[in-house]
Image: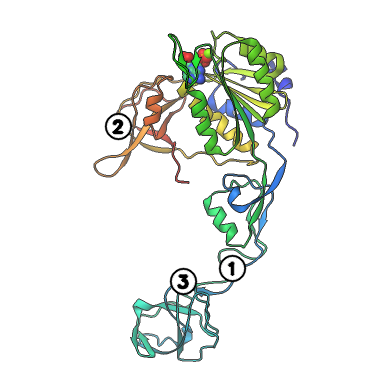
Amino acid sequence: MTTPSIATFISNTSCLDDYDPNSMPVAKARHFIKQFLSPVVESEVIELRESLGRVLATDILSPANVPNYDNSAMDGYAFNADDINVGKTTHLKVIGTAFAGKSFAGKIAQGECVRIMTGGMMPAGANTVIMQEKVLVDDKLISFTEAPKRAMNVRYTGEDLQLGQTVLAAGHLMRPADLGLIASLGIGEVTAYRKLKVAFFSTGDELASIGQTLKTGQVYDSNRYTLYGMLSRIGVEMIDMGALADDPELLEKTLLDASKLADVVITSGGVSVGEADYMKLLLAKHGQVMFWKIAMKPGRPLAYGRIGNAHYFGLPGNPVAVMVTFYQFVREALLVLMGQPKPPALPLFKVECTQPIRKLTGRTEFQRGLLFTDTDGIWKVKPTGAQGSAILSSMSLANCFIVLDESIGNIDTGAMVQVQMLDGII
Ligand code: AMP
Ligand code: MG
């Protein structure tokens, strides 16, 4: 697949009558970014456990049937369903025991059964298992009147995975269940795309780093810490390039170094209107970068493009805007660049909002929300408090975004709103 050139696009935007960098809808910005993404191609063979959070570079085919033999799903008795005395009591003679890992070697004849444990191999001649709680035992005889249906409580050969079938396809992001799934095939190594390298730095004359004394007019650089957290969850290789003053020479050097070291460069600050425009000048000089004002709140300014071979994301400086733009634009792009062709969309659920929200139409708002259970145990949502784009405490309190799209205006108490979870189970 050839990736279109951003430079060509930038010089031709006038042909697109609906392209307005000063009022870019969220969905359109996502779409634009998507067409320029060129995933990593290099892969490596890694130990199965190392593959958690990585993307498979080749299909994994099943070298065997799983399960490999018919076995019991219950502790009970294995028998032939033809022996059921329909409508009456069935009596069977117990001729042996089959344990998981220690099968019964014989064959059952008419009127016979075998005591069997969960996972035990089905003895020859048996096709059905009755659970032990449903039988009366009298020494070597069992009896039951409530018979199971034929083939009940048996796990059949290949019912999970069949020999030769594609178990996981290239492009799959490995999750905990996948580690077990691949282990169940006896496979200990997989081929995954190499880790994506992401360099990031903060910009701003007002930034102090942890360990420095805060002078009047300074703020501690928090963006590198939230970025570190968000990037850690995605599982990329990180290159933290520090907090830089708005010094053109230093910014230029760091930007160029970052673009040589990493597949992706992320900066925060310096792309908004009214900023000392060093970043913009540098980006225009060394790369092909689009500057957008996204029709969203928070997170209005956003830059995307290329510097050398690296993809570039210029996030706003405000701490909450950094997180929102990361989750709404960068996260998915990174997953694509890591080799996942179509990352699954993050689910949006509708729940009742227990507080009114003031909102203008024409832009998408990502309010910080708290999903909670009311006294009847029903899940509902409320905003976590002040929604200014610098107020990180309300982001820290949140467990979801309340996503209010462009067409939505003020929200009344009790209205249904869309939410997007921040925390996942796996
Ligand atoms: P900017 O986008 O550079 O105009 O910054 C917008 C606001 O975000 C300003 O109030 C900055 O002080 C603040 N800000 C920028 N970068 C950071 C950072 N790394 N950590 C905390 N606040 C920041
Ligand atoms: Mg700044």
In the picture, the disc for residue 354 is: 2
In the picture, the disc for residue 73 is: 3
The amino acid type of the residue labelled 2 equals: Thr
Q: Position of residue 158 (x, y in %)?
A: 59, 68
Q: Quadrant of residue 138?
A: bottom left
Q: In the image shown, does 149 or 313 lie closer to the viewer? A: 313
Q: In the image shown, does 196 or 213 lie closer to the viewer? A: 213
Q: Residues within 10 Å of mark 2 (few under 14, many from 20)?
A: some
Q: Nearer the viewer, mark 1 or mark 2?
A: 1
As displayed, is residue 118 above or below residue 295? below
Q: CA distance from mark 1 to mark 2?
A: 50 Å
Q: CA distance from mark 3 to mark 1?
A: 14 Å
The residue shown at (52%, 83%) is 104
Asked whether residue 190 is in view, the answer is yes
Lower position in the chain sequence, tag 2 or tag 3: 3
Q: Are marks 1 and 2 in contact (CB under 8 Å)?
A: no
**Secondary structure beneath label 2:** loop
**Secondary structure beneath label 1:** loop
Q: Position of residue 377 (x, y in %)?
A: 28, 44
Q: Which residue is mark 1?
A: 158
Q: Are marks 3 and 1 in contact (CB under 8 Å)?
A: no
The amino acid type of the residue labelled 1 equals: Gly
Lower position in the chain sequence, tag 3 or tag 1: 3
> In which quadrant of the rendered image does the N terminus lie?
top right
Q: CA distance from mark 2 to mark 3?
A: 46 Å
Q: Are marks 2 and 3 in contact (CB under 8 Å)?
A: no
Q: Position of residue 410 (x, y in %)?
A: 36, 23
The amino acid type of the residue labelled 3 equals: Ala
Q: Nearer the viewer, mark 2 or mark 3?
A: 3
